[in-house]
Amino acid sequence: MQKNKIRKKLRAKTKLMITLGVLLVLIVSILLFFNLHVNPVIIEFSEATVKSITNRSVNSAVSSVLNNTNVYDDIIQISTDAEGNITAFSVKSILVNKLGKDIGKTALQNLELLGSEGVEIPLGTLTGIPLLTGIGPDFSFKVHPIGSVSSVFSSEFVSAGINQTNHRIYMNVKATVNLIMPTASRTITTDTQILLCESIIVGKIPDTYLNSTSLDDMMNLIPN
């Protein structure tokens, strides 16, 4: 009888060890599958979503801050000689940088609002199997902006006809957000370029502006 009891205990203990071993293998397999297959899908899907959110935030901020004003005439002043030839461009750098800060601040507020909605990914998409993409309940992951939204200005001159040049001024906005996932977090940096304003200039533009970054340097004189 004593031997049978001992054998039963050994069998029960063996079954328990096997069960625990199977569970451990199962858990490790799930974690490996998640890290190797699910995480990359989350990252790829979320990066595209975050970039879309950032673009919407920046574009909305530009529309809100500019409010249909004639930005080009406000920030760029063109000097001409007695014959009407263009001699120089000057930039109201304080206004330019105030504009950049206002847009960056508003874009950050928009990003925080849109980011609080999170990134939703269907369960089928998480598997990485094309046939299951978009199928199943949604899983939501939070997006948190980090720091501030920074901006850099740039410009280009494009020929628009005889003795006419289209001068375009761009705003390059960089935003950094933190994506919180179930097993880890990831920092995503997005760069968004928007056309801030443009104007058709009549007259010959000095090569010192056409072939240099002097105008860009003037616009970015004060760091954001």
Image: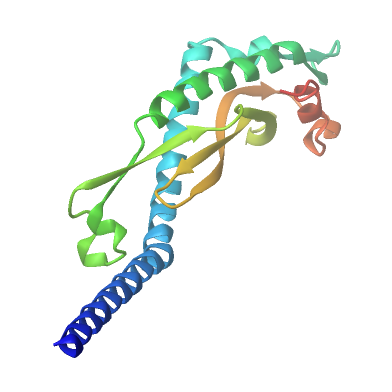
Q: Nearer the viewer, residue 10 or 68?
A: 10
204 is higher (above) or lower (below) than 129: above
Q: Nearer the viewer, residue 97 or 224?
A: 224
x and y percent of residue 169 in the render? Answer: 64, 27
Please report the residue visible at 86 percent of the width from the left and 13 percent of the height from the top.
81
Q: Which residue lies furthest to the front in this view?
A: 2
Number of callouts: 0
Describe residue 190's horizontal placement relative to residue 128 as left or right.
Answer: right
> Is residue 97 visible to the viewer in this orientation of the structure?
yes
x and y percent of residue 24 in the render? Answer: 34, 70
Please report the residue visible at 39 percent of the width from the left and 49 percent of the height from the top.
182
86 is higher (above) or lower (below) than 173: above
Please report the residue visible at 49 percent of the width from the left and 20 percent of the height from the top.
109
x and y percent of residue 118 in the render? Answer: 36, 36
Please report the residue visible at 60 percent of the width from the left and 28 percent of the height from the top.
149
Q: Which colour scheme is used?
A: rainbow
27 is higher (above) or lower (below) than 50: below
Q: Residue 36 lies in what quarter of the image?
A: bottom left
102 is higher (above) or lower (below) than 148: above
Q: Residue 1 lies in what quarter of the image?
A: bottom left
x and y percent of residue 18 in the render? Answer: 28, 79
> Is residue 168 visible to the viewer in this orientation of the structure?
no
